Amino acid sequence: MEIIGRKEEIKIMQSLLKDKKAHLLALIGRRRVGKTYLIRQVYKQHIKFEMTGLKDADLQTQLLNFNIQFTKYFKKTKPVETPNWLIAFSQLSTIIDKKKRKAKPILFFDELPWIASRRSGFLEALAHWWNNWAAQQNIIVVICGSAASWMLDNIVNAKGGLHNRITKLIKLMPFTLAETKKFLVSKQIKLSHFQIVQLYLAMGGIPHYLEQLERGKSAAQNIQELCFTQNGALRNEFENLYFALFENAENHIKVITALASRSNGIDRQEILNLTDISDGGGFTKTLKELEASGFISTFQPLEKKKKDTIYRLTDEYSLFYLKFIAGSRLKNWMTISQQQQYKIWCGYAFENLCVKHVDDVLKALDIAGIQSNVNSFLHRADEEYPKGFQIDMLIDRKDNIINICEMKFYGDEFVIKKDYAKNLRTKREGLKAVLSTKKTIHITFLSTYGVFENQNKIDLVDNDLDVEIFFN
């Protein structure tokens, strides 16, 4: 099967095969994003040893797992007792040295955080093995893990024997909307762009989730089957997801739940107010882990200090789960998806989608080559400017333009009525006044089917973009 997307990642991985240098490749990304599949597909002719860590297993069980895999890949080699990881790596060195190398061998360690448990000695042995043997070989060692923050702290930014040893780092992201469409087409699933967006708002571009979709069913039917039937693949995925990635996952879930309750994002202090987590290093670590793993995103308000950073839940599945699946009995999604609460929720989720696909927005505006920053902006009414307003996404450009981005998920052309037009004028005039900027303010609409042509649109809208820009 052809690999969907991942062009840059594949290019990097293949380039490592062409030189005669040793490479330590770290590949990180959230659970279910397709890391293992990508490695196996690109390197399938070159993998000489592969081991996947066992969750919550003790040292002896992990070593037994190593021995089983060693016997599988090196069938004619008599296994020896493996009391620790130093001996295990020594066995690998010995057997690789004996093999005639027609091509560059690859040794692959998957779910590394599960292998390298506390006091296992794995990281120390890995560092010793790399520094004293592997780094001098024409070899690629691939290490992979879903706990992105752990990988960054203990491997990529390691301070011990692995300090600065990573030669390449790849962070694998979920599919974009365009890649999601290609994936569905490869499965002969035919859906309109509107329905693909509906699916994306519920499960994001996670390949494993998309793999569960059935041909011949609408977006709503697939969501019903996966999320609201007794054995639906995504009905109980939420807790499995977080507990598989994080220690003390209860705190991570509390943060996620707090963020899900506020549609426009909240600052650090409000997260603390909504949870019973104490402030300090542990809380900071939780936020860092969630961001590194792709579940939350931070937004720096324009011309504000770091303490004003806004946190938003941007993992589509988590957002959908907490709103519609959590704590519920089996529901009829076909009915819920027609209700106003779903339409309101889609508005917030669509804003996240637009922020994630901001590169497509820049391209559609023909400003991809212009330096720009994507920010949010909140002004609370004061004496200087008595009207309060909030802008969830604006693009501050070096060519003296600021785009106020209005994002609307709507089943038809969006109509700008009198009250909404007044709100847009408040944002445009207020931003200029509060910032005291000489930059020109443009109002840019990102919507499903575009903005209906009336006088308000003519007066206010500078750029009218629809979801087609995400599928080009």
Image (tube, rainbow, N blue to C red):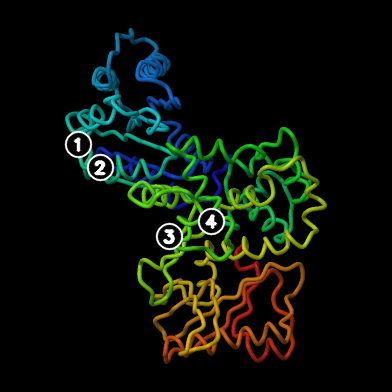
The percent coordinates of residue 374 (x first, y second) are 45, 71
> Tag 1: Cα neighbours inside 10 Å, few (<14), some, or many (≥20)?
some
- What is the spatial separation of the Cα atoms under label 2 and label 3, in whole angstroms? 27 Å
Q: Are marks 2 and 1 in contact (CB under 8 Å)?
A: yes
340, 36: nearer the viewer: 340
In the orientation shown, which residue stands out farthest toward the right? 335
* Disc number placed over residue 268 in the picture, else none: 3
> Tag 2: Cα neighbours inside 10 Å, few (<14), some, or many (≥20)?
some
The percent coordinates of residue 462 (x first, y second) are 59, 85
- What is the spatial separation of the Cα atoms under label 2 and label 1, in whole angstroms? 8 Å
- What is the spatial separation of the Cα atoms under label 2 and label 4, in whole angstroms? 31 Å
Q: Earlier along the polypeptide chain: callout 2 or callout 4?
A: 2
334 above or below 117?
below
The N terminus: image quadrant: top right
- What is the spatial separation of the Cα atoms under label 4 and label 1, in whole angstroms? 38 Å
211 above or below 467?
above
Q: Circle 1 is placed at which residue position?
A: 161
Q: Earlier along the polypeptide chain: callout 3 or callout 4?
A: 4
The three-letter code of the residue at mark 1 reads Gly
Q: For marks 2 and 4, give the one nearer the viewer.
A: 4
Q: Circle 2 is placed at which residue position?
A: 158
Q: 241 left or right of 92?
A: right
Q: Circle 4 is placed at which residue position?
A: 259
Q: For marks 3 and 1, give the one nearer the viewer.
A: 3
Q: 43 left or right of 254?
A: left
Residue located at (63% from left, 75% from top): 465
Q: Earlier along the polypeptide chain: callout 3 or callout 1?
A: 1
159, 429: nearer the viewer: 429
